[in-house]
Image: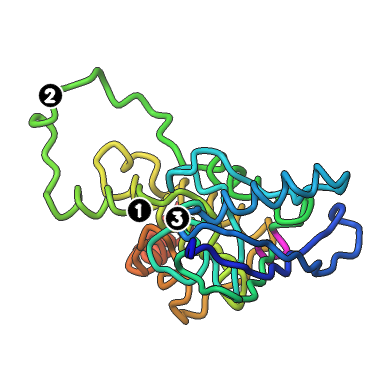
Amino acid sequence: MSGNMNITLKVWRQKNSNAKGELAEYKVGDVSPDMSFLEMFDVLNERLVSENNEPIAFDHDCREGICGMCSMFINGRPHGPKEGITTCQLHMRSFKDGDTIVVEPWRAQAFPVIKDLIVDRTAFDRIIAAGGYISVNTGNAQDANNIAISKDNADEAFAAAACIGCGACVAACKNASAMLFVSAKVSQLALLPQGQPEKQTRVLSMVAQMDAEGFGACTNTGACEAECPKGISLKNIARMNREYLGAQLCSEKM
């Protein structure tokens, strides 16, 4: 016996943002347990093309869990049944022979479907453009030991910077909130000395842009942290709320 599997896929097919979508069923045989989930889609697409059918559109790039593009909602969970991984790191051995797997795109007003499983996540880019950077002159490059940063702050900044912007937090949230993503990007700069001069304008601008994009409010259910492939902590949301409140109070006094 080869140990390979036969599975049934139910995949969301949608021509564009304005078209009506539906689930289409595909039988995929002789699937190696060692295939990644995306490799299995590659095999299916090769078959569809050979049959003169439209291949399934899905996003991918690095296939190493770094870029965050492989955004698939698999059997009701962002990136699938495993914790701490992206879709490209999910292997078919996580499923059983004869399984039916339902695959859908992220579901959020701010992430409109482009085609099939690809959604438009440029809302995240616009939030970063609103203030997720350092534009002030921080001086010439110095030896790292010349800048006093506590280990706790450095560790938390690195942990926040691990966010890859995949959007799993938005997909997992019942309100389609982007608070975990935005708070990670605010935190990674707010915790470092270089981020201090612009911290108030940064958080006000990024939160305003998040709201303008149509993301929902945070109600602290914790689904975002549970489904985040990089384990971004809810502590970042609390930090951003403190930063936001402080920035509002300062702006009112001016």
Q: Nearer the viewer, mark 2 or mark 3?
A: 3
For residue 176, side relative to residue 147 (left or right): right
Mark 3, secondary structure of its residue: loop
244 lies above or below 49: below
The answer to whether residue 92 is magenta is no
In this picture, which residue range is highlighted in magenta? Answer: 106-110
Q: What residue type is labelled 3?
A: Asp
Residue at the image point whose x is 26% and y is 21% from the top: 139
Please provide percent x and percent y for residue 83.
39, 68
51 lies above or below 253: above
Question: Hey, which residue is sitting farthest front in the picture?
Answer: 1
Mark 1, secondary structure of its residue: helix
Precedes in sequence: disc 2 or disc 3: 3
Mark 2, secondary structure of its residue: loop
Please provide percent x and percent y for residue 6.
62, 68
- The residue beneath circle 3 is 34
> What distance separates the C-alpha of mark 1 from that of mark 3?
37 Å
Precedes in sequence: disc 1 or disc 2: 2
Precedes in sequence: disc 1 or disc 3: 3
Number of other residues with Cα within 10 Å of mark 2, as a class: few under 14, some 14 to 19, many 20 or more:
few
Q: Quadrant of residue 247?
A: bottom left
- The residue beneath circle 2 is 143
Residue at the image point whose x is 91% and y is 59% from the top: 19
217 lies above or below 66: below
Q: Which of marks 1 and 3 is in front?
A: 3
Q: Which amino acid does label 2 sit on?
A: Asp
For residue 242, side relative to residue 60 (left or right): left
Q: Quadrant of residue 133?
A: top left
Please provide percent x and percent y for residue 190.
32, 49
The answer to whether residue 107 is magenta is yes
User: Can residue 55 be spotted in the picture?
Assistant: yes
Question: Hey, which residue is sitting farthest left in the picture?
Answer: 145
